[in-house]
């Protein structure tokens, strides 16, 4: 008797996670291919879940080019990435001028202003973005919007000196963010503590204030006790967004 037909292998339907990861990788690889050139010797590596794909692509450029480079991390996670990839680790106090920094973002608006600090790394991220000749953002399609605060609704991340947090919170409530709250690790563990030993506040603002992020940034930064604000205005040269269909949008 003839054997029963064997089902042909079916292509796997990608799960949403796979689509998002693929989008992050596409953005990261495209940005590295366009902005990290052999003559670039000092490279800033940002934080978050998109940045491992940046390092992956830089490693693929080969040992010959990477042996003459130094990589500056924006926090503990990127330091581990650099070390694990066997790349040379440096610090921004040794190398205050970077050729290029590539980092993720929580949201990017039509003018390339960004919200950053979802991972509480925005102080160091801003230093490395500012220190670089070229600052480039890589993200998946969910981070792209017209106006900040549309997709990222948790609020503007604000790093504060621990002893000043209650006063800063009160002042944030007064300037237009009544729902500003201290970011907690868990109720038991207490507040999130940044790599710099500070606390982080998440402050949502109304749309009319988010439409002018530079003015908002300067107002928040004026509050005593604020160390750095996760609004990156006029800093990025380009932003790369991986799309669900495998294409990359460049802003
Ligand atoms: C950390 C950041 C990250 O760059 C931002 O949260 C984006 O992360 P991801 O690539 O995981 O979406 O600002 O402070």
Image (spheres, helix red, strand yellow):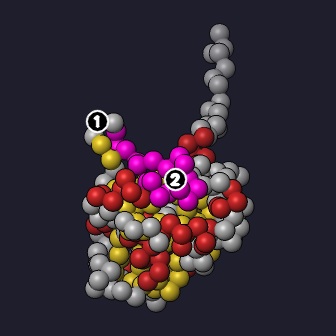
Q: Dot 2: within a 10 Å radius of its alpha carbon, few (fewer than 14), some, or many (20 or more) residues?
A: some
For this view, does 162 lie left or right of residue 40?
left
Q: Earlier in the sequence, mark 1 or mark 2?
A: 2
Instruction: Give the residue displayed 37% in from the left and 44% down from the top.
Output: 184
For this view, does 119 lie left or right of residue 245?
left
Instruction: Point out residue 44 in the picture as x, y percentages from the top left corner.
Output: 41, 75
Residue 57 seen in this snapshot: no
Is ligand 1 closer than 8 angstroms to the Cβ of mark 2?
Answer: no
Instruction: Point out residue 123 in the picture as x, y percentages from the top left corner.
Output: 40, 68
Residue 228 seen in this snapshot: yes
Instruction: Give the residue displayed 44% in from the left and 54% down from the top.
Output: 169
**Pointer 2 residue:** 173
**Pointer 1 residue:** 188
172 falls in the magenta region = yes
Q: Dot 1: within a 10 Å radius of its alpha carbon, few (fewer than 14), some, or many (20 or more) residues?
A: few
Q: Secondary structure at mark 1?
A: loop
Query: Which numbered marker is on residue 110?
Result: none
**Mark 1 vs mark 2, CA separation in Å:** 25 Å
Q: Secondary structure at mark 2?
A: helix
Instruction: Point out residue 102 in the picture as x, y percentages from the top left corner.
Output: 49, 72
45 w.r.t. 194: above or below: below
Instruction: Give the residue displayed 28% in from the left and 40% down from the top.
Output: 189
For the residues labelled 1 and 2, say whether their Cβ atoms are less than 8 Å apart.
no
Segment colored magenta: 169-186
206 w.r.t. 128: above or below: above
């Amino acid at each position: 008797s003839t054997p029963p037909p064997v089902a042909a292998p079916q292509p796997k339907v990608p799960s949403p996670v796979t689509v998002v990861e693929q989008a992050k990788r596409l953005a990261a690889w495209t940005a590295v291919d366009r902005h990290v050139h052999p003559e670039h010797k000092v490279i800033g590596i940002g934080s978050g879940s998109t940045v491992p794909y940046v390092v992956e692509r830089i490693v693929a450029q080969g040992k010959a080019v990477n042996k003459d480079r130094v990589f500056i991390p924006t926090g503990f996670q990127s330091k581990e990435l650099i070390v694990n990839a066997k790349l040379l680790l440096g610090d921004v106090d040794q190398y205050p001028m970077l050729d290029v920094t590539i980092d993720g973002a929580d949201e990017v608006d039509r003018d390339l202003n960004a919200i950053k600090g979802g991972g509480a790394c925005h102080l160091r991220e801003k230093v490395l973005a500012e220190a670089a000749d070229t600052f480039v953002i890589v993200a998946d399609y969910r981070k792209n919007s017209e106006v900040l605060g549309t997709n990222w609704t948790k609020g503007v991340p604000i790093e504060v000196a621990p002893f000043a947090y209650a006063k800063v919170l009160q002042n944030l409530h007064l300037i237009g963010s009544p729902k500003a709250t201290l970011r907690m690790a868990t109720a038991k563990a207490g507040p999130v503590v940044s790599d710099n030993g500070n606390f982080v506040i998440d402050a949502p603002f109304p749309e009319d204030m988010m439409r002018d992020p530079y003015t908002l940034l300067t107002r928040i930064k004026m509050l005593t006790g604020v160390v750095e604000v996760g609004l990156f205005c006029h800093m990025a040269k380009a932003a790369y967004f991986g799309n669900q269909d495998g294409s990359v949008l460049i802003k």
